[in-house]
Image (cartoon, rainbow, N blue to C red):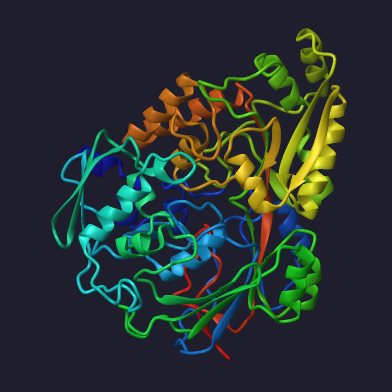
Amino acid sequence: MVHDESSYWQRFDRSRLSRRRVLKGAGLGSVGIATASILGCGDDDDDDDDDAAGPSPTTLSPGQGEQPKPGGTFTLHMGGSPRSLDPHFDTFPYCTAIVNCTNEGVLRFKPDLSAIEPELAQALPENPDDLTFSLTVKQGIKFQDIDPVNGRELTSEDVKYSIERQMTDEAGKFQHSYFFLGAVDSITTPDASTVLFKMKKAYAPMLSYLASPWTMVINRETVEQYGDLTEHAIGTGPFIMRNWQKDVKFELEKNPNYREPGLPYVDRLEYLIAIDPDTTATMFTDRQVQAAVIGSNQKDRVKGDRGDANYQAVPSQFWRQFRMSPTTPEAPYQAPFDQVRVREAIVSAIDAQQVLDLVYGGDGILTNGPILPIYEQWALKEEVAPYDPAKAKRLMSEAGLNEFTGDIIWATSPEADQIGEILKRQLAEINVTLNLTPMELAAYYNQTYSYKYVFSHHVPLNNPDPDENLSSYFGRNGRFFKYHNPAVWDLIDKQASELDLEKRKQIVQDVQKKIVLDFPMKFMFTVNLHEFTDPAVKGWFYPVDLYDGRKTTAWLDA
């Protein structure tokens, strides 16, 4: 069957390849970076060498093979407050940190992204042909026994409602609509357990999107009672949300009627919110929290003070871009950006390595295009728009542009503020003056998603399937950036409908080069994340995809 030969998430899961081959085949292997920097129990002898080489995206498994102990409160750091608890709308990882515990999806990725597995579904979908996905929901699963669902049983209609809501074409509201919008023709429920997806076209990323941390099954009653899911997260998940003190903390407690006996292991989850990186580091060293992601500039202090901690460094899937104005058919590039050589000049004047060195001490890796190097089989292997200040000055002269002034916005933080200052100095070399405009996180995202700004430097997301990194930023239904280029749109659509893996890889390479050489932005770098957990935390460590907020299997050896 054609689809069976090329649906790589299913194919590689079945083939029982080595983990390294699975990662490569699924687009999750690492390139240009050494083996993982996985350090624990105070072993800091090789820290400098490991950090310099660069880590690969693997996950620790503390407590593997041990008998889990029930009870206790697992306290984690959260780096900010979610704008809402609506997984179909929000884009902050703080949202899924909560919602992936209160709600579930039909499928999910394994924590190391090596395969997709069922969650609410009995098995991976069946594919009788290239345009059909048939999914069976497990029977006997119940929503949490709280108003307004009051413990009623989950049915296929809930899955249908959730996916149809997520793919609603309502600009600025359903940010993850591009997962399915334009690809799914219809969703039907022949019975209470069966969900039948009919596609408009062959669609390679379907399983990846069904397994996304954002594709959560919700219920109609909660939406209708409250009007939205801004402050309410009620699902079938292992934890019930009990308290949300804005900008302070979240408290969740064990769902006593969860479908898997004995799970979750801990009685309570608690998230303490702190935005400042130094405060975050102190919270972990002072044992106020048992898990935290620490910045490059704080990692040595934490490693020195908490040599007992589980520790891992991995390249972040969140990375840095310098963006020019978004464009739409109604709002194309305005002068002087309507000249591609001006955009190229700006990109050529930015020294991403200098920014990485000055702000993060070189603790990261440069990027060549829209897909990060950690996704080896999809990423561009070479830089096609390098730093070239002489070329930048020549292009500006050829464009007849002696000087230009524009605002640059970003979400404020100590590191981001430094990046703004360095970019200002670099672009001043070609007489482009940046008016620095840092903004608080929520205000910045509201401005970003109005798609009205001159410049920004931004931290977008990269996910394992290339479509996520192409269509959501550069496609015709883009949600996180607006980019008007029909030729690129057509190539993005083409890769999404190509089921032959090798052919799809070539299209992905071609479209990335076309995007980079149209110069809508400078693709800069990804920094390394430094992930710490207390040695008492077992059964869980930070997954490769930090949007995956599940904590079901965590337990405390205390």
- Closer to us: 132 or 94: 94
Q: Is residue 334 left or right of residue 392?
A: left
In which quadrant will I find the C terminus?
A: bottom right
Q: Position of residue 325 (x, y in %)?
A: 64, 28
The image shows a total of numbered marks equal to 0
Q: Is residue 281 visible?
A: yes
Q: Is residue 348 left or right of residue 328?
A: right
User: Image point 84% across, 39% down: which residue?
Assistant: 422
Q: Position of residue 12 (x, y in %)?
A: 35, 51
Residue 366 point in image, percent of width and height: 69, 41
Q: Is residue 306 visible?
A: no
Q: Is residue 209 above or below residue 262?
A: above
Q: Which quadrant would the N terminus be assigned to in this image? A: top left
Residue plotted at (61% across, 57% down): 35
Q: Nearer the viewer, residue 240 or 429?
A: 240
Q: Position of residue 339 (x, y in %)?
A: 67, 13
- The image shows residue 304, relative to residue 314, as above or below, that is below
From this view, report whether residue 326 is shown above or below residue 283: above
Q: Tell me which residue sits at (50%, 67%) in the image.
A: 98
Q: Quadrant of residue 394?
A: top right
